Image: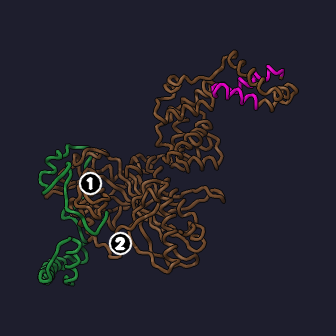
């Protein structure tokens, strides 16, 4: 199982907009590597005959009917937001990317 | 001095790729029961699921799956016996979850095609656009960038988010690359989006309003040297919000790429934004640094394994194809190919059909929508269908002309007034006191006046030169300010002059 490199961590930090010091990158690279290796051991248990699954239960086709239910009030929706303005969530400026 | 389009296509072959996003017209969202009304007050249609609050569990809207399968079937796709949702991870506040629920390598529909026709100088040409996939995802919230001068993200101080749109079911329809369109690439792109829109509308799965963003097109364009099989670098133009813009965006990008290539520069692989006012694109996000969305199967949702009977029931219930419908209309109305193409190109076919369904003669209905109304639309730079005149108004006007209550000239005045907001045709006619002068006495006064003003012309008519009467009829129409019935004037005039 390949570990996780310092570059991988740096790239993830960039994507997540988390500013990390070089020492933190080193530390996390080795720590995440340990975690990944632990998960990889679980993978070894599954034989060739076990297809990869995305869900622990043998379920498929779970649907809901197209019916409208009561939404939150805007006050409730915004109540946990660190900041809001004009009934909208207020977030810091987004740099370097444009949707 | 920008390059001419003719010079671009002489040297380069365009390669198209189109991605269309369509918001489905379900009552509730994709994974929760929140309402989907366009233009609702901000954050009034949200809940723990679409806000991504901890512990909330999404459940798939069955109607959305049904609609997606219908779209796939209408586009001649195979419906996957097994498909899954995946998380597309990215850090951007338009999704509060830090990921978008989408589909990755297991979309619901694959491998379809859509045939489109375009009207060219060389006659009607057909192109087959192959569909790679139709997959399900959810729409994102809407951002308002505040502060700064431009309202754009650069220079903004902060952003405000409305999550009403977050979680509305969205279907993405992706074409394979479309080679071989040559100089017709812009028209093919437009015709494809128009045909797709008509299909989606006939399926009744979306309101397909480009101006409201329920149908959005991203146009990928690249150029290669004619004769070469090496694909060029593509750009992806977003923000293309009308059929006309699709055509302009593709043409504009072809010219921009060719200019760069001619100068020996390279095309940067990037997202560009279409500017409605200039018809040009500006650079957005560079894709040089590969996106890393770290897709993985969505653990909160179970796989979709559609029942074969369900699929076949949906297939059997598919409505008439728009192309078949058009052929039927063309035959019923006895419209020549060119005229039909004009209606499609002006995007008035549907509104003409509605007008005919309200009792109007097809030729007359077409004449008004393609004539006077299209002219006014052109002047105002809007689509004819966006003008405040309805099929019912036009049907009423056609009927009034047929009974002789309006002349064509008066009808044009009524149309202008209706569009100017003066009311429905009957109200305009009453308010303005518009009526056809058919009183013989009043007409005779005008006729006498015309004859005395042009005695030589009158003499010719008396001598048997009937076509010369046109000048006199014109004078009478002028005198009565267009309110006379020309046929009636002609009849009275000729009789008066002994013809």
Residue B357 visible in the shown view: no
Q: Residue furthest top?
A: B441
Say which quarter of the image contains residue B85: bottom left
Looking at the colours in the rendered structure, which chain would you say is drawn in green? A
**Residue identified by numbered label 2:** B286
Going by the image, does B495 lie left or right of B146?
right
* Magenta segment includes B188: no
Q: Main secondary structure of the magenta part?
A: helix
Q: Earlier along the polypeptide chain: callout 2 or callout 1?
A: 1
- Whether the residues at callouts 2 and 1 have beta carbons within 8 Å, the answer is no
Residue B232 vs B324, above or below: the answer is below
Q: Where residue B166 is drawn, which disc sits there?
A: 1
Identify the element where label 2 is drawn.
strand
Q: What percent of the width, then of the height, locates residue A86? A: 20, 49
Question: B326 and B65: which one is in front?
Answer: B326
For disc 2, the neighbor class at 10 Å (few under 14, some 14 to 19, many from 20) is: some
Q: Colour of chain B?
A: brown
Residue B280 visible in the shown view: yes
Q: Residue at x 21, y 60 (%)?
A: B97
Q: Residue at x 85, y 26 (%)?
A: B459
Q: What percent of the width, then of the height, locates residue A24? A: 12, 80
Magenta segment, which residues?
B471-498
Question: B58 and B263: which one is in front?
Answer: B263
For disc 1, the neighbor class at 10 Å (few under 14, some 14 to 19, many from 20) is: many
């Amino acid at each position: 199982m390949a570990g996780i490199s310092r570059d991988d961590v740096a790239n993830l930090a960039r994507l997540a907009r988390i500013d990390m010091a070089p020492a933190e990158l080193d530390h996390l690279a080795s720590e995440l590597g340990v975690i990944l290796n632990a998960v990889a051991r679980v993978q070894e248990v599954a034989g060739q005959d076990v297809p990869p699954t995305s869900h622990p239960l043998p379920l498929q086709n779970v649907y809901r009917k197209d019916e409208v239910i009561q939404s939150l009030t805007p006050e409730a929706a915004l109540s946990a937001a660190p900041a809001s303005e004009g009934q909208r969530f207020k977030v810091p400026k987004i740099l370097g990317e444009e949707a | 001095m920008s390059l001419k389009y003719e010079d671009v296509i002489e040297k380069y072959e365009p390669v198209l790729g189109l991605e269309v996003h369509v918001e489905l017209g379900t009552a509730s969202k994709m994974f929760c029961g929140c309402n989907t009304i366009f233009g609702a007050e901000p954050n009034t249609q949200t809940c723990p699921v679409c806000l991504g609050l901890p512990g909330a569990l999404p459940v798939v809207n069955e109607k959305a799956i049904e609609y997606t399968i219908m779209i796939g079937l209408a586009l001649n796709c195979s419906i996957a016996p097994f498909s899954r949702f995946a998380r597309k991870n990215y850090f951007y506040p338009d999704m509060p979850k830090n990921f978008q629920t989408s589909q990755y390598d297991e979309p619901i529909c694959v491998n379809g095609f859509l045939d489109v026709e375009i009207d060219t100088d060389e006659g009607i040409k057909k192109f087959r656009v192959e569909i790679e996939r139709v997959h399900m995802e959810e729409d994102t919230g809407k951002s308002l960038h505040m502060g700064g001068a431009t309202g754009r993200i650069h220079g903004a101080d902060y952003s405000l988010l409305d999550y009403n749109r977050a979680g509305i079911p969205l279907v993405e329809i992706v074409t394979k690359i479309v080679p071989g369109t040559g100089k017709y690439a812009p028209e093919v792109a437009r015709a494809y989006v128009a045909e797709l829109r008509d299909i989606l509308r006939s399926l009744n799965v979306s309101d397909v309003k480009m101006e409201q963003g329920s149908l959005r097109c991203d146009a990928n364009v690249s150029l290669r040297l004619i004769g070469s099989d090496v694909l060029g670098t593509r750009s992806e133009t977003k923000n293309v919000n009308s059929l006309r813009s699709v055509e302009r965006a593709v043409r504009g990008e072809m010219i921009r790429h060719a200019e760069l290539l001619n100068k020996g520069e390279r095309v940067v692989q990037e997202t560009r934004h279409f500017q409605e006012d200039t018809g040009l694109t500006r650079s957005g996000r560079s894709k040089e640094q590969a996106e890393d969305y770290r897709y993985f199967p969505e653990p909160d949702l179970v796989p979709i394994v559609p029942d074969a009977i369900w699929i076949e029931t949906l297939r059997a219930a598919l409505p008439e194809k728009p192309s078949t419908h058009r052929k039927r209309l063309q035959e019923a109305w006895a419209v020549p190919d060119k005229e039909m193409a004009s209606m499609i190109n002006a995007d008035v076919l549907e509104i003409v059909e509605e007008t005919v369904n309200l009792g109007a003669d097809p030729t007359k209905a077409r004449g008004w929508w393609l004539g006077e109304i299209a002219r006014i639309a052109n002047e105002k730079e809007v689509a004819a269908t966006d003008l405040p005149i309805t099929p019912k108004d036009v049907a009423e006007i056609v009927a009034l002309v047929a009974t002789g209550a309006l002349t064509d000239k008066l009808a044009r005045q009524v149309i202008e007034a209706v569009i100017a907001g003066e009311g429905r045709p009957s109200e305009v006619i009453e308010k303005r006191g518009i009526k056809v002068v058919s009183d013989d006495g009043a007409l005779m006064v005008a006729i006498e006046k015309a004859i005395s003003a042009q005695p030589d012309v009158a003499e010719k008519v008396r001598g048997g030169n009937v076509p010369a009467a046109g000048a006199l009829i014109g004078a009478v129409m002028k005198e009565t300010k267009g309110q006379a019935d020309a046929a009636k004037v002609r009849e009275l005039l000729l009789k008066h002059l002994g013809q």
